[in-house]
Image: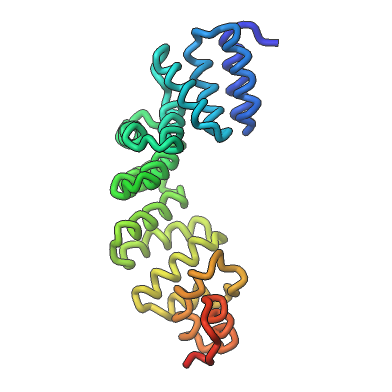
Amino acid sequence: MFSRADEFIAGAVGRLDDGDPHAASEVAGVGLQCHPDSGRLWEVRGCALCLAGDPDEAVDCLERASLLVPLGALAQVSLADAYVERWLPESALAIYDHLARWDGTPVALLPRVAAGLGRLQQYVAALRTCRRIVGLRPTHHAAHFGVAYYLARLERPAAEAVPPLRRALGLCPGNLIYRLNLAAAYVRMGRLADAYTLAADVSPERLPCRGWAAQLLPAIEWGGDQEMAAAYRRAAGGFDDGGH
């Protein structure tokens, strides 16, 4: 069993790396009984509790850690995430904004920063963060999608979302959400032929929700497959009147 603080830290981090935040929290908790002044143990336990879905305890641990050691980037984003869960938006925003601008933030954490900014409805900052990810890691398909998503949240023209959506789909061609969003953007632009090419083989049963059927219906009707169009109308919640 562990005895030194660094051994408990390594054990807890190892369990975090294995995807078991509950076990990581337990190891760090045992370590803190022996080493209550170890800022890093409080830090690791706080990160683990955040991932385990316990924001109240996570905030307590991470704030204690911050009094003992400078928090690392993972701990900072974990604290911001926990602040969001506890609805302390100003505290969360201060951290997210710092991490979004700080050169020391690992690229792997920037998606969490962008998502946090989005949850706080800071769409300009979230868009800027996604663009930063794309600049640092051009093959990050989710970041390209994030660019398109936040452009839409900012009510920018659909045409602006097409290039990042095409890039995201090109990098991850099996992603149905990317394909549906690109098709929907084409519908909004009036490019029904392009939209139909993307949606023609997507049955209504594969759509995540009814709203997609309504968005894509113009393209499906343009394609001329009456049976498919009728199925989309039913999925959209309308009566099948033959398209009239």
Q: As displayed, is residue 196 above or below residue 134?
A: below
The N terminus lies in quadrant: top right
- In the foreground, 11 or 244: 244
- Please state the horizontal and vertical placement of residue 125, each as a whole percent of the image: 30, 45
- Please state the horizontal and vertical placement of residue 155, each as a whole percent of the image: 30, 61
Location of residue 116 (image quadrant):
top left
Residue at 44% across / 35% down in the picture? Answer: 86
- In the foreground, 173 or 19: 19
Location of residue 70 (image quadrant):
top left
Q: Furthest residue to the right?
A: 1
- In the foreground, 136 or 151: 151
Location of residue 228 (image quadrant):
bottom right
Q: Is residue 128 visible?
A: yes
- Please state the horizontal and vertical placement of residue 159, each as a whole percent of the image: 32, 67
Residue at 53% across / 81% down in the picture? Answer: 233
Q: Is residue 107 visible?
A: no
Q: As displayed, is residue 223 above or below residue 114?
A: below
- Please state the horizontal and vertical placement of residue 72, each as a whole percent of the image: 42, 23
